[in-house]
Amino acid sequence: MAPRVPPTKSTPTNVKQPATAGYPVPPLNAHKLPSKALKSATQAKKPKKAPDSTGKRFPRISRPVELLRATYDTVVIGSGYGGGVAASRMARGGQSVCVLELGKERWPGEYPSSLSDAAPEIHISGDFAPKDERSKPVDRGNKTGLYHFILGAGQNAFVGNGLGGTSLLNANIFLKADHKTMAQQDWPDELMEPGSLDEYYEKAAAMLEPSPYPRDFPELNKLKVLEKQAESMNLGEKFYRPPQTTKFQDGPNSTGVHMQASTLTGQDCTGVNDGSKITTLVTYLADAWNWGAEIFCECEVRYIKKHPKEGYLVFFAWHGAKRPEFEELFESDLMWVHAKKFVFVGAGTIGTTEIMLRSKQLGLPMSNRVGQDMSGNGDILAFGYNLNENVNSLGRDSPLPDHPIGPTITGVIDCRDQKDPLDGFVVEEGAVPSALAFGLQPLLELLPGEESEDDTIADRVRRHAAKLGSVAFGPYYQKGAVERTQIYLIMSHDSNQAVLTLKDNKPSLEFMGVGRTEHLQTLNKFMAELTHNLGGEFVNNPFYAALNQQQITVHPIGGMNLSSDGTADEGVTTHFGEVLTGDGTEFHDGLVVVDGALLPTALGVNPFATITALAERCVEGVAKKKGIEIDYTTRNGVLDMFGYPEHPIPKDQQLIEAEDMISKSLATGEGGIAFTEVMKGFIHVGDDIQDFKVAAEHAKGECADARFFLSVRAYDTDTFVSQSDHRAQLTGTFSNGMPGSPFMVLRGDFQLFNKDTKTPDTASMTYDFDMVGTNGDVIHFHGEKHINPSISFSPTRTWEATATLYVTLSWPDGSLVGKGVLEIGMRDFIDQMQTLTAYGRNDLVQLRSKLKFFSYFKDQVAKSFFSPLHVLQYPSPPVIGEEEKGKKAPNKTFKVLSKDGIESTMHMWEPTTTSTPGLTIVNILWVPGAAVDQQIFALPTIKKNAIEYFTAAGYRCWSVTHRTGRSPAAQDGWTSFDARLDIQAALVAIREATSEDKVYIIAHCAGSVALSIGLLDGTINPEWIIGITASNVFLHPEFARVNYLKARVPLITQAYSAFSNSSFFNSASTREDSLFQRALNQALRLYPVGYRDEICNSVVCHRCSLVFGKLWSHRNLNEATHSQLDRFTGGVSIKNLRHLMKMGVKGRVLDADAKDTLFTDANLERLRNIPIFFLSGVENTVYAPEATLTSYVMLRRLFGEKGYERVEFIGRGHLDCWMGAEEAGHGGVYELVRKKMERVIVMGKEGLRGPQGRIDKPEEDGAAGATATNGSISA
């Protein structure tokens, strides 16, 4: 690349400068321009932002906060001259850089030009204290707006917010501080030597390229009038055209950003739209961007703290996503970023001092002089109203060709060369931007003016006529009073006695006495004479006249003053801007102030050149201390500001994906949606409590409150609504008092109403993210809201479902950190609705986006709210899910023949874990109930089913589908009494196939009833059995309440037989079924199924509930199981059903004729010495949980306590004891059954499978279920 063109030294500031004074502009060919014409904004490639509503596109070098990283080498606060220097130089030093700016990013073409445009950009804050009255705190308007008025006692300030800071709005004048000012005793020795800053002025000038208003440009009336005024005061030699940072020719600037020559609009103070203003945005910040700095806007830094390991934590409030709507939390639940090496504070004098005062309050030690000895730089604003010459000082976006305004300032009367430097000052002419033009005359007329004593009647008549002309023809009437008004901008010296403090955590500025000094009266007299010499009326600034001699400054300085002797007694910072700790010369390594807050005195001239030079010196100095080499020599090519930086920081895959998604959205301008949400509650930290509500209640007792403050954004509403997982992005904080709190949430995952695979007919709103603590800890947050048919027709339940989040915190290795519940309060919900924002290229796209989001949200909630009326779910072709893939098929499938000639199907699975050599494998026979088969134990739709669990534990598993199960034989009218023969046949087959004498049996429901009947009547030899697990029923099939009532009054079976003309009830049904079956399906929508949680739309589920009772608690079945129930359930003959009903009413097993003949002493004796483990689900509504209790109590009474155990599983129903998705986990049914079984095997079959051969924990046990055995009731 071409070498940087070295700047030349400026001419002295105390003499009249020639036309070429200033710093040379590098030639255009220094940037290796392409052969084609320079790219304009509308020609650039790689669009980063869609056109706005006017069809224009503007660059964006700032990034959405959603792309923030948690840690950088360097964090820069603010983006004015100091912040810009720090960002550029550290990025060129190979450091990762984050820039945080309160304001927004705007480029030429986006600045307000009318009062209506400017008004929404105004922020007024501070203490309003008119006429020495007691001050009143004020905070009104847009905090991220472009224009910030700060009210103070004695003096007020005007500063700019935005990417580029006050450089966006200043008057561009680049003048060095004079030596006499720099030699005052308030400055450090290192800076008092003549020329100590010259090298850094030149560095600044090389970037900002200041040059005077060219002699060959159009003549400017206001400049000509100022020169005439200087000559009228015999100060012609003090007048010159100062260097200014305005482009006067088209072409790229020093950084490579293409700029336009000034169109002489005079709009600098509200933002120049012609592309000629050389701000930090188009120089230092553009350079920083090209070298990899990541810039974030609308980020209000609140304070800085030491990081517990290295560097600093910078806490900020993000104004995006309408987060300020949550007023109570906005300034307390702060986001943060970690700076490993440096924090450069350049938030502007008042912003920087406020941040450091608050940081000091919160424990960061520093000098007690923070906020002291501030200055307004002796600024004075005044008006020479209604002169006898046209001044043309009103800005216009499009000036008349023969009547240009010029840049805001083009001339100066430099009176700094005084015997006492404190008497020095400069006078510059100004311009009023068009946004204020129509209000200027009424303002000047209201204020007291000072006319010359030598005025004649003719002078007064002329002025009166000119005033009438402005009233009649408007402020731009060339012969009117307003067009004849000169604007005076004076910089001088004040007493440096201003103080900034925090009152109620807000900055309070006091410049008491500034407007009453003798020096000020001298300057007012000087300006009055300038005015009277040209026949005008002198009007002081509005604050001075209306508010008891108060002034307004655009150059507040000081507050973090450079220490004159390097100690905290004489200042706040070292000569390199490092913040002193308050203990002698000790300073905070890497915490550096780089803006006007450093200046210990007023400069008596526009200060930005000196601020920039000081920043250059500070950054270079602290970089050298850490061995960072800044590349000052490599030049950028012409930058494509719509493209991508040449030297980006490396990104991880997550960041790349997020960046691509955002870039595509911004490029297309498609509609997006965003909102901010606050949820509060309690989270118990510890792995000892599994239940969410129990954990939350316990945490409440411990005052362990928690909350998050998260912003949700979907960049494309169409995709968000239509994609299967309905994914959006989360950004914000989580706080709960744990070490590391508040935790930062970056690029978290939010899913809206995605299908919950764990629970049937349930949509979930999920929050998934890794959050980073201030101590570096990473914790995973998983939260779920569940919306399902339980909310049917209940507004209260609907609110609870959408406002309650069940939270699990875990470490990266998956181990539990804690659990709890967060909720949305009504006040927070109202605020949340205020934050809902639609994005898009125009209003129509935004409206469509918002309507689509609301429609989708409404439809999803309505689906559950009106669930009983929703479309029924009929059986559909099976879907092979992820859980089903790779399931092990039975090793063998064959038929067994019973004594009465009925064939049943038998499946066998060999163990998948090898047991200890020499030990015999134990065989388990699994007996399903009525209308089901081996699939309830070998369920393909869950991660690990019972067969997989027990084969992994080293057992050989067998399962017989008896004649009343899911079998063609079931239609032949067999009963549970008959099914005993199939169990007996299965035992014979196992004994023959394995040569083993004994088998362990796990029997469920009707299978368990059939087993008990076979044992009682002697069909099944008890000597063949090691032990039994009786699931939900055994000898005493006692119906639960609803089933008992149906059995006592068997109208259902009678009606079904009559209307269906069938003796078999099929649990499945189709849309093509008979009219009666379809009518029955519709009627069953309203069939009582227990609690609201059990409402669903499955036809199969409804029909099963009708004939058998509620077979499961829905929350225990996953969606894959529930949606395919027709694969796992069959039907039942009316004859078998009536037999079951009679037993249910009687409460004990009956013979083939439903007679009570089985309970004889001889028959019961056959059960002696068979260990039996009884289990029941507490929520079983088929057989009452007491059914197993009755059998358990009776057998213990008959044969003693040994060998009998019983457990009720809380949260389980009937079939879900085996089909539940989580039963393979720790504390699940499988684990407890295995442990009970192994105890029996060891005790009753010594040597068969001794302690050495037992597998106490099968491989891959899985996670503990939500309802573990710590909640079991053991009888």
Image: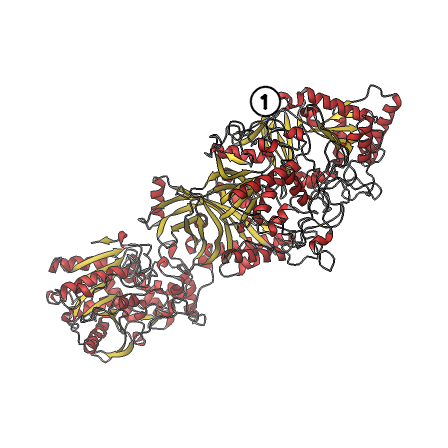
Name the residue that disc number 1 marks.
134
Q: Is residue 337 visible?
A: no
- SS class, disc 1: loop
Residue at 87% x, 27% y is 462
Task: Report the quarter where the N terminus lies.
Answer: bottom right
Residue 174 place in picture, x, y as percent: 70, 38
Residue 571 to residue 1026: above or below: above
Residue 250 to residue 657: above or below: above
Q: Is residue 147 left or right of residue 453?
A: left
Q: Is residue 329 visible?
A: yes
Dot 1 amino acid type: Arg
Q: Is residue 999 left or right of residue 158?
A: left
Neighbor class of circle 1 (other Cα within 10 Å; few <14, some 14-19, many 20+) is few
- Res 40 quadrant in image: bottom right
Query: How many callouts does the rendering have?
Result: 1
Residue 858 place in picture, x, y as percent: 52, 54
For this orientation, the residue located farthest to the bottom is 901
Tell me which colouring the rendered structure shows.
Answer: secondary structure
Residue at 51% x, 27% y is 569
Residue 306 place in picture, x, y as percent: 46, 39
Q: Is residue 290 left or right of residue 1132?
A: right
Residue 429 place in picture, x, y as percent: 76, 33
Residue 1172 to residue 796: above or below: below
Task: Report the quarter where the C terminus lies.
Answer: bottom left
Please name whichever residue, 939 or 801, is drawn nearer the observer in this view of the structure. 939
- Res 1020 quadrant in image: bottom left
